[in-house]
Image (tube, rainbow, N blue to C red):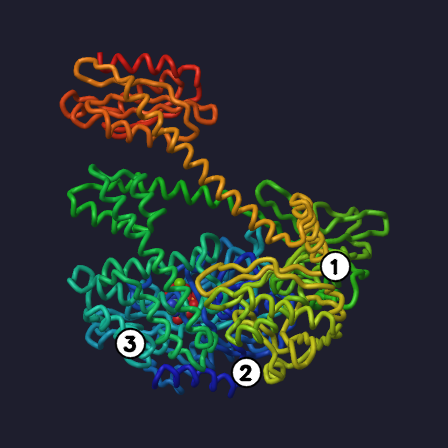
Amino acid sequence: MTATQIRQAFLDFFVSKGHVIVPSAPIVVKNDPTLMFTNAGMNQFKNIFLGEAPAKAPRVADTQRCLRVSGKHNDLEEVGIDTYHHTMFEMLGNWSFGDYFKKDAIAWSWELLTEVYKLDKNRLYVTYFEGDEKEGLEKDTETYELWKQYVDESHILPGNKKDNFWEMGETGPCGPCSEIHFDSRPDNERAEVDGATLVNADHDQVIEIWNNVFMQFNRIKDGSLHSLPAKHVDTGMGFERLVRVLQGKTSNYDTDVFQPMIQFIAEKSGKKYNSAAKPGDADWADAVAMRVLADHIRAISFAISDGQLPASNKAGYVIRRILRRAVRYSYQTLGFKEPFFNELVPLLAEQFKGVFDELWNQKDFVQKVILEEETAFLRTLEKGIQVFEQYKSDITGEQAFLLSDTYGFPIDLTELMARERGLIVDLKGYEAALQEQKSRSRAASAIDTGDWIMVKDEDEAVEFTGYDETETIAHIIKYRKVTAKGKEQYQIVLDKTPFYAESGGQVGDKGELVFPNGDIVEVTDTKKENGLVVHFTDTLPSTPDDALTAIVDADRRNNTNSNHSATHLLHAAMKQVLGTHVNQKGSLVNADYLRFDFSHFAKVTEDELAQIEAIVNQKVRENIPLKEERMVAYQEAISMGVTALFGEKYGEYVRVITFDDAFSKELCGGTHVKATGQIGYFKIITESAVAAGVRRIEAITGIAAENYINEQTKLVQQVKELLKNPKDISKSIETLLEENNRLKKEIEKSVLEKSSGLKDELAKKAENINGINFIAQRVELPNADAVKNLAYNLKDIVSDLFLVLAAEINGKPNITVMIAENLVKDKGLHAGNIVKELAKEVKGGGGGQPFYATAGGSDAGGIDKALEKAKTFVA
Ligand code: ATP
Ligand code: MG
């Protein structure tokens, strides 16, 4: 079976068991402060498990792209070294939301593996949770009994909390689980050592392929477990591992999922891939490097196509670090001194066509972003090598840390380079510096989130009323305290709310919660967390049970609406003027302005900007009414030709915002004007580059645009007045500039004339001391260039010259020393050293070459003393 067939067989099997196939969520998580990247198939269903949102279907299945490079699940350091952990992998999963439980889940996983995929039963091992006294959790005998129907007891093994109790993160849904492991060792080895002893023992031929989690609990902040409202099944099977066992391989990298990529890398590097290489073998390092590249390109590409560009903080930094890890291996081990990593993108995009089309649709963009990062990092690496080469003695911990932190040198590279030069690296010092940095950044980002305090029992999803009104009567469902950077805040969830929670680039609403007893709780921001709308406040009401009126700051909201609708018009106008390749790459919409990032490979010209602006303003004047369709089936919307964004997770039903059927149709959850005329006027303020292939437009609307135009008009008026109201301002400024240029040149000329006049005068003042023609004089010249000129001119006409010139330039002393070259040689005189001494008299400093040097100072009163002192160097 090919990988493609294996994936399809999984999905088909669960369809036959009544499951609905859903699309993978994006790999980049939005709206969940506890998670950066999707690390399991269940993430997108978290709020269903928690009872915060209803399930759309009781049974679903999918293949989810996952990333395990940060947080609780982080496999990054294993990747490449072992053969079955990846950064990005596909997790095949089936779910029951309060529908079937352990019995069916176990029966079906066995049926699929042994009857559909026909895996050898003797090589399969299953596990169950042995219980945990400390947590008060019982042994999962139910699972044990269920397995006994299919599996010999010698292949059913107990497992501890670490392996058999699954948790997504520090808090959240969790429960006991049952894993399925596969032993792919050759028969002779199997005869010698019982496979059961190798399960969960990090043996690379006895690996976990599938985990069936029985979600029953929610772990809250204080560590305690609470029963979930219903029991669920959540399973996850590593696709690449499944393919490996079905294709009879001993490494995931030997399957058709990775081989094309590995072979491409091998060919381009002129090296061979040896899958069997062991640590210590000559080709081990190459094998690891090829695996790292073949793996990391997947994580990077999918993160970028789902909207996470490499950056210097948070999720973007995680992506940048993975990319750098790959580039290091490519540079250091495989010998690619020029960017190469990005060349893997087309192959990968091709491979995932029809599975995750997001990548195929953006492959040029993704490749360009990687190329840019790679180029920049290669430059940094080279700089790091230069820094390293300046180290002449053993490398201190701080130096090693600097190399890793600033120049991306892994510690083993530093050690290797040190060894080549017979130097030692202070590893302990390095570790200490690393730990210190870690604890610093932990302290800076520590957020203490308290548990929810329930006010009202409510299972229904929260209702958002803000599309229709800005004031709603509501109740508090729950609230909690959050402390970050020493500041205490509260988060409040209402049963109904007109407050728009930050998303899709639009900022969260501000406003007030007004209580019957007169309490007013100010809402400072509104954010989404999974499905919840969370209101941020600095205080709590004294009567949280009372009905309240939630009132949005309507002015702020109206301005935001204008900017949001204008963003849609802008997007459509850009597609018309620049081409359909223009895709939104990020946006910010607030009450003051809008910011729109988009894929486009060249600067947008003035002319194009003017056209775009004109189209938008035309649409504003047409006063097109908003057409808002709240519940359109996703597929129907797509076939209507709406603009959907990459990396956005859309549900089964979507909201479509249309301004003129033939002009702008977008999937959007934001708030908008009732008709485009409300935008008033649209004005682009800047156009700039933000990253490789990504440009940014900033624009304003309505009152902000009016203010802007007024200010510009006022400015022109002021200029006009300064110029004494000419008919043509630009012409008048041009004349002024020309005049100014001419005058500058004239001044330069007269200064030159003056300094050559001075030359002859000074030459006459030369005093012969010990065979040296000594001149030390104060001169009146307007700038340093003129003094320099004079010194060089004197050198041409006076032999054996020792010259000191002092001038006051814009009130500051300036000293110049010029010494004939023969004097420098024969008498050991050094202008640089001498000028330093003289500068002390004018409270300054300077330096230069042996024959010419200058100094500045702050006390012009010392000039005469300096000139007197000059003589002491020749007398
Ligand atoms: P392991 O102990 O092997 O790291 P896990 O216990 O972390 O696995 P789960 O969190 O239960 O794994 O994830 C479900 C399945 O996803 C696993 O059975 C495995 O097949 C697969 N899987 C987990 N992590 C990875 C990874 N880094 N790369 C590829 N597949 C993985
Ligand atoms: Mg793991």
Depth order, front residue of 782/465: 782
| Residue 158 in view here | no
Amino acid found under the numbered disc labelled 1: Lys
* Residue 849, position as x, y percentages in the image: 25, 30
Residue 118 in which image quadrant: bottom left
Q: Is mark 3 within 8 Å of ligand 1?
A: no
Q: Is mark 2 within 8 Å of ligand 1?
A: no
Residue lying at 17% horizontally and 59% vertically, measured from the top left: 280
* Residue 16, position as x, y percentages in the image: 51, 88
Q: Quadrant of the C terminus?
A: top left
Amino acid found under the numbered disc labelled 2: His
Which residue is the site of mark 2? 19
Depth order, front residue of 611/758: 758
Which residue is the site of mark 3? 259
Which mark is in front, 3 or 2?
A: 3
Q: Relative to 608, does residue 260 appear above or below in the rendering?
A: below
Amino acid found under the numbered disc labelled 3: Gln
Which mark is in front, 1 or 3?
A: 3
Q: Which mark is residue 456?
A: 1
Residue lying at 66% horizontally and 70% vertically, measured from the top left: 616
| Residue 718 in view here | yes
Q: Is mark 1 within 8 Å of ligand 1?
A: no
Specify few, some or many for label 1: CA neighbours under 10 Å numbering under 14, 14-19, or 20 or more: some
Q: Relative to 339, does residue 657 appear above or below in the rendering?
A: below
Please indicate whether residue 743 sits to the left or right of residue 524 in the image. left
Check whether the beta carbons of the residues at disc 3 and disc 2 lie within 8 A of each other.
no
